[in-house]
Amino acid sequence: MSDSKFSYSLLATDAQTAARRGRFQTPHGDVDTPGFMPVGTQATVKGLTIKQLRATGAQMVLGNTYHLALRPGADVVAELGGLHGFMGWDGPILTDSGGFQLFSLAKMTRVSEQGAVFRSHIDGHAMELSPERAIEIQELLGSDVAMVLDHVLGLPAERAAIADACDRTVRWAERSLAAARRTDQALFGIVQGGLEADLRVRCAEQLVELGFPGYAVGGLSVGESHAEMCRMLDVTVPVLPADRPRYLMGVGRPIDLLESVARGIDLFDCVMPTRNGRNALAFTDEGTLRLRNARHERDPRPLEADCPCAACRHSRGYLRHLFMAGEMLGPILLSIHNLTYYQRLMHGAREAIGRGEFAAYRAKKLAGWTRGQEP
Amino acid sequence: MSDSKFSYSLLATDAQTAARRGRFQTPHGDVDTPGFMPVGTQATVKGLTIKQLRATGAQMVLGNTYHLALRPGADVVAELGGLHGFMGWDGPILTDSGGFQLFSLAKMTRVSEQGAVFRSHIDGHAMELSPERAIEIQELLGSDVAMVLDHVLGLPAERAAIADACDRTVRWAERSLAAARRTDQALFGIVQGGLEADLRVRCAEQLVELGFPGYAVGGLSVGESHAEMCRMLDVTVPVLPADRPRYLMGVGRPIDLLESVARGIDLFDCVMPTRNGRNALAFTDEGTLRLRNARHERDPRPLEADCPCAACRHSRGYLRHLFMAGEMLGPILLSIHNLTYYQRLMHGAREAIGRGEFAAYRAKKLAGWTRGQEP
């Protein structure tokens, strides 16, 4: 990378897959890859203090342009120390651009070449988000990595509409690069293209030509099958330069992460660990556990015997009680456990890649998840 | 005290008030008094992990017989390690008997000499709670201190009804003593008597005659004025033996605590720090702060500059944002701050008593609360 404040070091490549181990350096510290970023949409990873978040093993967290611009406002965040100072996280932060929320959350979004006009999901207030405005907001937030504003479509979609959104995403990416001013913030491009392999490839090639310090694969995890997602990675990732980090946005389940790592992805974010945790679902090496299930009532075992997290200091019976009694500590502890699980999964993946044994690691995890799956 | 596993050591008496500093020894450790017990009704202090609870400075916590008997059931708690093992708290625990919940929460409670019959507030299930059953449940829970089942009335009440409930409370206390089997659990009697000074005195005298290892003042904080509460303590506390701990149940605001300490109370419990914290109200030496107030939007200051808690690592602006955005971390952090505030208040009280300067300490705190009160 040209800017000395950011660099990606490739440390090891797996023997049998495209998995790679690396280190992404940012002004707020290093991120070991492949790595998982907990989602802190509104400047907080739901239910965790900063100390607890750090204890899960997280190195980099995600914030959201759309949400923070609406509330409390980018100027408030800037005045209170930028996103790092505001939320009290001194490690690396990536901010999403808001492209996904324009598609998933905002009301009456209309996209033109200039940008998107929409109504806030909070109070219906009319707002505008252009590529330049998305950069301006993210520069106020002061994240280490900003994302370009992209044009996201739901799947399935017409090929013509996908091609149009894809081309617009590239034009917006170019405008974003031209608008960016901060030298302590890296801007990542986002590959769109729905499930059209050739459009994905073309979009990636055009973005690479523009020259970003990192690339994301977007527009997945929006309703397509696991196989379709893998197929898109198979065609897209090889186009991306080996000396830049690759980030798969919004994905996913543990199996999605390992299959994507096998295809050369370095960074992930997803709400699953926290959202499922709040809903009493725990991830383990033996599959998922639904803690409200009566069979856990008197179970003295922790979720996982070897897990160092705060939840695993308690019995499954106690965790079930917390959910049955509607106690906040249930969602808190399961969010902590699930985030810890994801971090441990990625840590294990990095170790396996270092030994050239990632394929075996993936197979072993998959076998455990399949074997232990709760009926 | 007769049983060697429990003892109260009087360490210092204040020069100008009846405040006293002491140490209450239990099988799970010592409690410095005057001290505040956070309320963990359902085997969790709402929103805090055990590590966070310990970090507030809490030494002893409270659990509830009524709630835990209903859900998950005393046998489940016993099977999962007793209340200590179940919730993962290895310090002293006191369990309330359920008397207060029969009055405040249960449906269609009918009290007879035998005990109370009521319907669960959760599912309407009919249940019975007698003095003996309350002991049985608390022995299953395995708390360090159990409370006798008392007959609580709302205020105001007819003198005849108060006298009747008072006498019943004494008879039930005697039955409770006879029923108690565990030598590692101390049983506290509870003084009732409404706002009738002579009934309070008589009840206290009768309980002292029965000989408990500790005494509680109950039936306050149920609608009476601060002055009335103080008047009841003025007449009741002098009747209680100086070599046993004195516990004022369910009280209260910071000012209530200091006025009660001045009258010789050693132990407190109250939901105010956590309940108010969940509702965006913070206790400080400059009075209470309502964090949803717009004036905090851009305030970079912590709640209290010298507070070591996790909330005070953040700005008031950030805390306000969490509440406005409906984020769990707001209630969590304010619960932590308020519990820390109560512990620091009690710590300061103990230090002041040790120096014989408790009256000045109380006056200084009161001046701060009055001066800083938010409009």
Image (spheres, coloured by chain):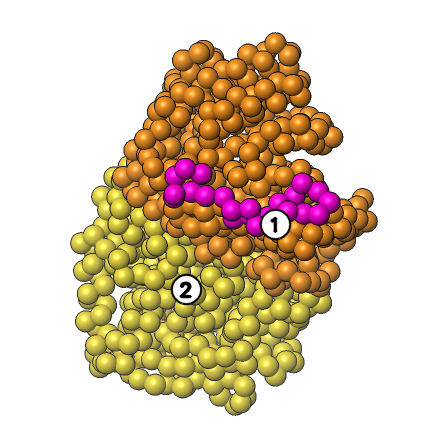
Chain colours: A orange, B yellow
Mark 1 sits on what residue?
A12
Q: Residue at x 66, y 51 (%)?
A: A353
Residue B313 in view: yes
Specify whether disc 1 shares its chain with disc 2.
no
Residue B71 in view: no
Q: Nearer the viewer, mark 1 or mark 2?
A: 1
Three-letter residue code for mark 2: Thr
Residue toward you, B167 or B324: B324
Residue toward you, A239 or A140: A239
Mark 2 sits on what residue?
B56
As drawn, B335 above or below B77: above
Please state the extent of the stretch shown in magenta in the rendering: A1-23
Residue toward you, B155 or B345: B345
Where is residue B105 drawn, in percent x and y? 54, 52
Q: Residue at x 60, y 29 (%)?
A: A239
Three-letter residue code for mark 1: Ala
Q: Is residue A273 left or right of residue B159?
A: right
Where is residue B254 drawn, in percent x and y? 32, 61
As drawn, B100 above or below A328: below
Magenta-span inclusion, residue A14: yes
As drawn, B160 above or below B5: above
